Image (spheres, helix red, strand yellow):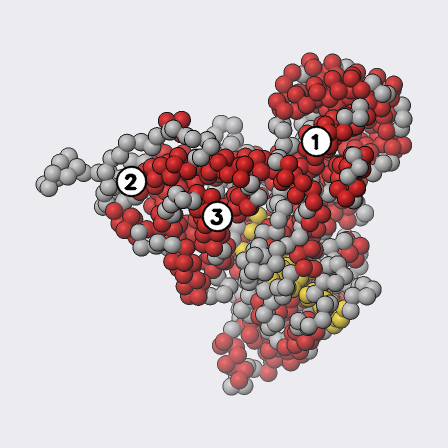
Amino acid sequence: MVLSDGAVEVTTARLDEFVFSEKAPLRRLDEYEIDFDDARAFFTGRWRDTVTTATDRLTVSDYQTASKYHDWQDLANEISVKLAELPSNSNFRRHMIKIQPLPHVLTTFTRKFSNIMTPSIVEFELLWGLIYLNLKLSYGSMEKLKRTTDLLHSIRRLVELFSRCLEVCDKQNEAEARIAAIDFLDPLLYALTDSIDYLHGPSESNRGSWPELRESISAQLRTMDSTVKHLNEITINTRVNLDLQVKNMSQRYALTAEPDEPGTFPNTILPFELNENFYGRKDELEKISDHLKPKNDKSYRTYTIYGRRGIGKTEIALQFAHSNPAGYDAVFWVQCETSVAIRQSFTDIAVALELPGAQKDGHHEENLMAVKEWLKRTKRRWLLIFDNAENELILKAYWPTQGTSGAILLTSRKYYNFQNMGRRGDTVKPFDSKQSWELLLQLLGPEWQRQDREMKIPQSEITAAKAMLAMLEGLALAIQQAANLIRDDNIGGPTISRTFEVFKERIRTLPERYSSARSSAERALDALWDMNFSLLSKNAKVLLGVFAWLPPDKIPVELFLPTVQSILDGPLEFCKQDAKHIDENNRVALADVIDPSPQLLKAIEELLKRSLVKRDGRNLSVHRVVQEATTFGDLNDLQTSFDATTRLVHYRFPKTEMDGSLFSEWSICQEYIPHGVNLSKRFKEHTTTRALKGSVTLVELMSNCAWYLHELGDYEVSGQVLETAISACENRNSLLYAELRSTAGSRFYDLNKLGVCRKAWDEALAIRKSILPENSPRVAAIYNNLGNVELATGNPEDALRYFNLAIPIWKAGGDKTATHLALSYLCVGRVYMFQGKLQEALKMTSQSDTLFMRTVGGDRGFMANVHYAYGNIHFRQKNLAYALRDYESCLKIGQANMPIHPITAAAYFSIGVVELAQKNIDNAQ
């Protein structure tokens, strides 16, 4: 259609605006003439074309808005102004804080790059404008702001990595760096413009391409990441930089001095928002503050809040953290329910601080080392809060090292006397009668408080309240639940005296616990919980019953949104999506399980209203006392809720195949391993009273959890989970039991317990051979394992026999078993090396190398073993130059993937041995 002024009507995502004009598409990279000795002309031309293409995608008003932001300072000011306007505890502010360092990081990068482009001039004005435009379009929606800040945060990390590569890039590689910059800056600009389209929202004309647009943004980030790795490969493999790398290996976790310290401050990780109904505890907070306030000496202070369950220890710690009277730069909350939870907390801290080498997926031990080193070296004021620190042995591994200066606050039901840690603490006392009354009135609301001030509350109400509060023994959580009952029309109506009468009757008629006899205090508290639970709807009761088996601090809503809806059969039927979204296979599309079902939402809101759970975004939490109270009920209900919970976690947790690795799914494992470990712990607790029975689903879940923990190197918890699985497995002649014994053998092998290792693998082999065909890959896996045991115990001929039994089976499996075949080849190569057959060893190692390169790539952990094997062979051949190269390649992969793994330590040692053999004493040291 032609408009009156002759312009062409344009249909876009923003119907009221016009793009500038149609331009020719951006030339492909291979259409440019590039001087690889001096790529400056190529870069400036390509960048100019990229900027033009990006500009053409903007609307008139978007371009005018972007043009107002000319440099990094404009963007930094925008972010600072927004942060100043926002409340300190808002989610909006939390997202904005993530990107506060971006302007400085990006301008540092552009300056470094401009230096190697001299005398050519590169203009980056559009970059700042596009970033601002992304922010401006996000301000109206929390969801959009989160997406945008996540994107900008990812960009920031990639820019930092690229900048570090530029820092160590020598003159020889400057030309390659300029070309690599095109592969980096092109997708950076496209990701920002794609994001602008995305933030404007879909229209009827582009709705179909919406998923592709989101995928395009992800693809641009992957391209940037690949470019960083490419440039890193170039810079790291020069002789000068390799020498520098070896020289600085021991400083992997060292932090740069201020002001270049990574991370954004203030930096806070807290599980909950500030409790608006927090009452009293002034003396306790002052004691904590006085002891933990920063001092000038190089020491750290510890303070323990300890006391009985439900007393309010966590709330006191949370109140202190939010008020932050000492002005700590960093406040981090550590969940101590299990070693898995603590480990995850330290990983979260490492990632939040953006420490060198910090990784969210796996690498927990490395993250722990990095955090402990930061705590020791930083000049920032920091506070660590260990919540529910019940296990001293577990906690000691995570304790800051001597010479650290900071503050540590613990909450615990127990008191530990750590030696030489200068710790103080105090018991949190129950509220006295006066405090209990004041808290109850506060929870009942302003009208009750007004009547109390005016002395209009009837004496009968006061008398009933004091009697009831005395029975609740001044516990804050119990008083909160009493207030809920008084306000409820079905119980109090709202009068305290009526509530008290119902309460006394419930105490009298309360059935006994199945596990143990109650004290008088426990009977009163159980009666209180029973009254509250009796008011819940059926769905809310079921949901709370499931929560009782999960880690209390972080229960993701996604757990209740499986695409396979049959997982929700039975008591969780109300969590299913609308029938119109469920296909004939009882499945729903991912797009249809983004939000909980209306019935699930209603149940969650009911629990929130009664203060039985808390919500933080898409995660829920429940007090441990509430969890314990739900497990005093009917045994059939307990079994039903436990089985339903097991099915949910089993569905989410990745499954092993053919004794293979879960490495590619570590990120998912990491999210759900706390739930698996908690189920293991709770099952063990209840099997002592024979209250719970196991199931095949539980055993399968425990088996997969144990294998993941074994891969991580968490042998202690892996063993505990295996114990649960074995105790729950009724059929000791099943393939499932063989799987458990196979995992147990792998664990014993790594712990160098070769006798019990052999016994476990022999048992697994016998079961598999009795059920499976002789050429089954699962049989071959045990052959290969037994070969490793024989080699480790000095029996190379027997080892070779087992490996040769496995290899034909792997070959018959084709591509599916190619990685396993590569491992067997590598093992055979080791046997030949120990036998002195170096040419045969080199041949088998080369075949392993080829297969690994084709299946997993050259940068995975498997390849560290291949390079190390090459180094050993070449060293025995006295080819020291080749051996040094191989060990250095092993070290490089080890540093990137498993910095504290024995193979990495072996590479360090072997490099030193080669340097010593070459008379390079200083390098060897």
| Residue 315 visible in this rendered orientation of the protein | no
SS of the residue at dot 3?
helix
**In percent of the image, x 38 and y 47: which residue is there?**
124
Where residue 640 sits in the image (x, y, percent)?
A: 66, 43
Residue depicted at x 28% and y 31%: 24
Mark whose residue sits in front, 2 or 3: 3
**Residue that carries the numbered disc 1 in the rendered image:** 885
Check residue 112 in the rendering and tell me which mark sits there, or answer none: 3
How far separated are the C-alphas under marks 1 and 3?
A: 31 Å
Tell me which amino acid carries mark 2: Asp
For residue 183, what is the image quadrant? top left
Residue 630 lies, with reference to residue 850, above or below; the image says: below
Nearer-the-camera pick, 887 or 54: 887
Horizontally, is 458 left or right of 189 in the view?
Answer: right
Front residue of 545 and 865: 865
Q: How many marks?
A: 3
Mark 2 sits on what residue? Answer: 56
